Image (cartoon, rainbow, N blue to C red):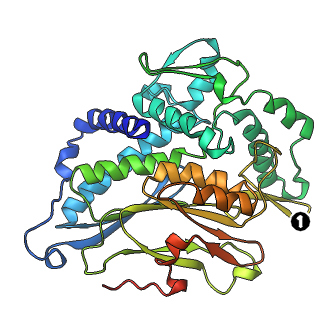
Amino acid sequence: MKQSLIRLASLIALSVLFFSLSFLNISSGIAETNPAETYKRYSVVFTDSFDTVISFIAFSESEESFNATASQVHDIFLYLHKLYDRYNSYEDEGIINVYTLNQRAKDGPVEVNPLLFSMLQFAKSHYPETNGKTNIAMGAVLALWHNEREYATDHPDNARLPDMDELKSAALHMNIDDLILDPDAMTVEFADPEMQLDVGAVAKGYATEIVAEMLLAENVTSFIISAGGNVRVGDSPMDGRPNWGIGLQAPDGDVFAKSEIAETLFLSNCSVVTSGDYQRYYTVDGTRYAHLIDPDTLMPGNAFRSVTIITKDSGYADLLSTAAFLMPYEDSRAFVESLDDVEGIWLFPDGSKTMTDGIAQHAQSQGAKNTK
């Protein structure tokens, strides 16, 4: 119920925000005739949001109608990117974002857009469920890793790890209870002035779900959004296939060199979100250090090459995939299997993989086919 209310607040806020952009004009509806004869598949790619490539594919009655939809999808992603950004200020555009909060919330309550407030409330409310592994309040720790990763980009021969004493000092300021959220005033305040937010573990998935639900609300139902490791699909494609084919990227390395796809899933009306060590990382003395940092060890997780979560909500899948990646396999599997309507796939450093029983029936490697 809490998750539904939070999402509803986001959708209401987004509807108001984009009403002036005539968002209602993107509705495509479902024709009474054969959809395969009426609707065609169109696609577009964006590269200016969430530091990743975002592709949007949908079936539409015309290219003009699709382009109008795609333009609004792009606008929403770009706005949410700015709202959830911790590295840049957009106050000249009237946006109070995560960066602004990290500067001001230590001095008292800061009123924020409902789309930002709801995402923070969503992440905080699910923190206990992830056993503390997905913690948006550990920005001070993540900043130290980010700085060294950036330094390594310019000085690869001198790449280094963050100082452990500095990490431990930063870890003293990542108590999620110090994030004070007032839903009545829509304000955010830091009880610990040295706490910093980093919402990278949930923001992209949360944004993807907002976009998906707005599309569904406007009857644009047959679509697939791919935002980095976050995939959200709507109703089945209008070309006769019962499901979308979703490819899971194979991590780099010799053990996966035979194919760029580690698995193909056939699914509709759900999210497939992957956390892995192969997109954002750097190397020190021949060892790879990923961007996914365990709040208990203050070091990157290394039990897996990737963990994929399959569930309905993309924001939920995003924070679960981070948590599952940072647990030992036995704990990670038990964690996923303890959750309702959640499935998982694990890829290991030796090239092997395993998955929960519920998703195996949708996996090509287990005999699933995309036919009626």
| Residue at position x 58%, y 55% in the image | 338
Q: Quadrant of residue 85?
A: top right
Q: Is residue 71 left or right of residue 308?
A: left
Badge 1 local density, few (<14 within 10 Å), some, or many (20+)? few
Locate the C terminus and report the quarter of the image it occupies.
bottom left
Q: Is residue 135 left or right of residue 9?
A: right
Q: Estimate the x, y position of residue 208 in percent, counting from the top left.
A: 43, 51
Decide: is 131 above or below 92: below
Q: Quadrant of residue 333?
A: bottom right
Q: Is residue 218 left or right of residue 119?
A: left
Decide: is 217 above or below 243: above
Residue 23 seen in this snapshot: yes
| Residue at position x 60%, y 72% in the image | 355
Q: Estimate the x, y position of residue 286 in percent, counting from the top left.
A: 89, 65
Give, as a three-letter code, the residue at label 1. Answer: Gly
SS class, disc 1? loop
Residue at mark 1: 286
Q: Residue furthest left?
A: 32
| Residue at position x 55%, y 52% in the image | 318
Q: Is residue 151 left or right of residue 88?
A: right
